[in-house]
Amino acid sequence: MSNFEALFDYIQEISGKLLSEDDKRLLMAHFKPKKLRKRQYFLQEGDVCKYIGFIVKGSARTFTVDEKGHEHILKLSLENWWLADFESFYLLTPSRFNIEALEDLEVLQSSNAQIEDFLKPIPAFSAMANVISQNYTIANQKRMQAAMSYTAEERYEDLISNYPHFLQRFPQNMIASYLGLSPETLSRLKKNSFK
Amino acid sequence: MSNFEALFDYIQEISGKLLSEDDKRLLMAHFKPKKLRKRQYFLQEGDVCKYIGFIVKGSARTFTVDEKGHEHILKLSLENWWLADFESFYLLTPSRFNIEALEDLEVLQSSNAQIEDFLKPIPAFSAMANVISQNYTIANQKRMQAAMSYTAEERYEDLISNYPHFLQRFPQNMIASYLGLSPETLSRLKKNSFK
DNA sequence: AAATACGCTTGATGTAGGTCAATACAAGGT
DNA sequence: ACCTTGTATTGACCTACATCAAGCGTATTT
């Protein structure tokens, strides 16, 4: 038995609507619990992202590998976040991203086709989908602006104030990559900001 | 009389659905034509973005000004694109962005409240909204990845292949800012890639 | 038609942050 | 308990790109 309550609570909170017992049954029938151990991949570059996952427990990173072999983390994800490469998921194209568990991971996953099945019948779910897509658009806009206008130090301070728990959950080299910095630079930057 | 046909065509093409005559009347009643001359602002930093605009003719830039007074262009927009700071528009918070006409601009604009009025009644419109939000998410993901993983030159080549018409419509210094480069760097970069 | 502003290029110089390498320590696996 | 692997720090050096400044051609403005 897996924790569907986390998913139900999440949908109800984000959408501001209640789920009926039928809704819940429908969700339980279409979302499958899946466990990944640390280091396992939820998605590998080149594969189509067939599933979207809701994180019940654990953490993950979404990253690319460039031609020089360097990794770039685009997203760090925790409990109550969705896990997917949306481009690949929506368009069914091969993904350029890897998604890897950073801690043992429990997700509830569902396929593109199945999601369509309850977008219409469950009003709370489609309301949630709309809110999320708004939030994503906003977050992306902010992140893009930060990447363009802020210095490394400002971006780090931004992270501290917006996602303070990241510092506890993710090692510093992951944070550095997420900020677009080398681990050395982040280390130095922290030292200087403390004097 | 203004060109609503462009808007109708756009909605129908993106959504894959037809608009009824009633739909069209509803849209015409709620979207108002607005003209801006080159250099005029569609949105100013600090104001709430009350309107979303559909560009019928012309072009615009969305940019921020940092504390050193430097401008950073986040978006360049042309015909058949939507114009808004979605964060401000959705949440009704003061915007950090400016949106300025780069050429004489004709838009069809509507307020947040009015948009809600036809999200439900016009199926083609809500289908379009969903597709657009998907496209935005995808485009943002790509852009973020490009900003993190690519060099200046790669980003420029990316732009050439994805938006070749940008080079005709926007001056080079705007392109540079959009790519996160100084105008001098872009100029040099072009010279080198031609040998 | 003159005056002004704007956009592009080129050169000289500056700097934020990357790369490489060494060390130290903590954590997991067997 | 040992060995391996991952993570953080620090120093020396490097590079991509920014900044500053000057010159030039082409639009705009008056």
Image (spheres, coloured by chain):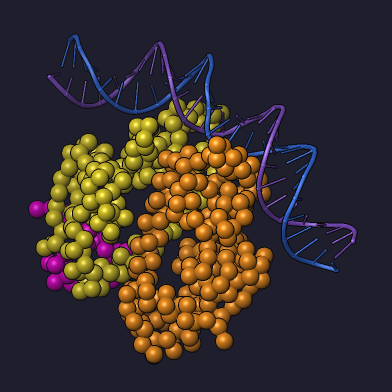
Chain colours: A orange, B yellow, C blue, D purple
Front position in the image: B161 or B51: B51
Instruction: Identify the main secondary structure in magenta.
Output: helix
Q: Does residue A64 appear in the picture of this structure?
A: no
Q: Place residue A12 in its image quadrant.
A: bottom left
- Residue D4 picture location, percent across and down: 83, 57
Question: Is residue A84 visible from the viewing direction of this image?
Answer: yes
B99 or B81, nearer to the observer: B99
Can you give x and y, in whole percent of width and height, for residue B19 in the image? 21, 70
- In this view, the residue in front, A59 or B107, is A59
Residue shown at 31% from the left, 55% from the top: B87
From the top left corner, tell me how far across and down residue B51 is, in percent: 20, 54
Q: Which image quarter: residue B13?
A: bottom left
Residue found 45% across the figure and 84% down from its top: A27
User: Farthest residue toward the left?
Assistant: B1
**Residue ID at (66%, 49%):** A69
Split into 4 quadrants, where in the image is the N terminus of chain A?
bottom right
Q: Is residue C24 left or right of residue B129?
A: right
- Nearest the camera: B19 or A186? A186
- At which x and y percent is residue B153? 52, 38
A136 is higher (above) or lower (below) than B19: above
- On screen, residue B71 above or below B99: above
Name the residue at 50% across, 76% down: A111
Direction front: furthest residue:
A195
In the image, the segment drawn in magenta is B1-27
Q: Is residue A38 magenta?
A: no
Q: How many marks?
A: 0
| A44 sits to left or right of A50 | right
Q: Is residue B161 above or below residue B8?
A: above
Q: Is residue B12 magenta?
A: yes
Instruction: Point out the image quarter for the C terminus of chain A.
Output: top right
